[in-house]
Image: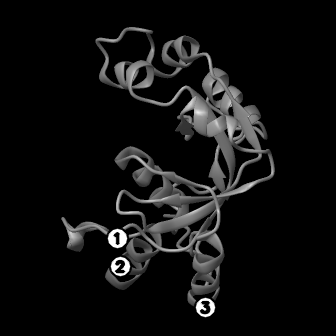
Amino acid sequence: MQQPNLAPVPELYVSYESAQKLKVEAADLISWDLTPRQICDLELLMNGGFNPLKGFLNEADYTSVVDTMRLADGTLWPMPITLDVSEKFAESLELGQDIALRDQEGVILATMTVTDRWTPDKSHEAAKVFGADDIAHPAVNYLHHTAGKVYLGGPVTGIQQPVHYDFRGRRDTPNELRALFRKLG
């Protein structure tokens, strides 16, 4: 039986010292207040749960994932991981600009370099990803009626994990789980 690969999963967090410096610098950046759903995606990006992604999908990767379930480089990836924002916020940004990503209490969790900005065809996304453009499907309904109209893509630099007040004993990162698996043999 082949042993599973238990090498550490790459995370997107900077060191504690770098995070303290980056937090101060990020306070001056334009910021986006993340929705609870976006916080979940960001956390999985930062802790390696969405490895090999290094941030929210750029337009080329998004298009490829929607159409072929693969990143533009051919790597299997089944779902678009996107940062959806309002048109007004998207219009205020320049490509290449860094933004701060904040939780609902205003805490800066990460920064992101905006490399891509586009307005997706959500009907096409719904049909390809969820099998139908039918708002009876909760994810399609969310896509059309809750998610922002514009997507931003770009690499993320993690500053700190989101704070959770529930299920604290069940929030292991991929690397924490790998360490547990090694310990259990």
Q: Quadrant of residue 99?
A: bottom right
Q: Looking at the image, is 35 positioned above or below residue 26?
A: above
Identity, as a three-letter code, of the amino acid under mark 2: Leu
SS state under label 1: loop
Q: Looking at the image, is 94 positioned above or below residue 97?
A: above
Q: Are marks 2 and 1 in contact (CB under 8 Å)?
A: yes
Q: CA distance from mark 3 to mark 1?
A: 23 Å
Q: Work out which residue is located at the far left of the displayed protein and give it.
A: 166
Location of residue 130 in the rendering, given as x and y in whole percent from the top left corner: 44, 20
Q: Which residue does the image show at 32% across and 80% down from the upper left? A: 184
Write down the residue under mark 2. 180
Write down the residue under mark 3. 17
SS state under label 3: helix
Identity, as a three-letter code, of the amino acid under mark 3: Glu
Q: CA distance from mark 2 to mark 1?
A: 10 Å
Q: Quadrant of residue 147?
A: top left
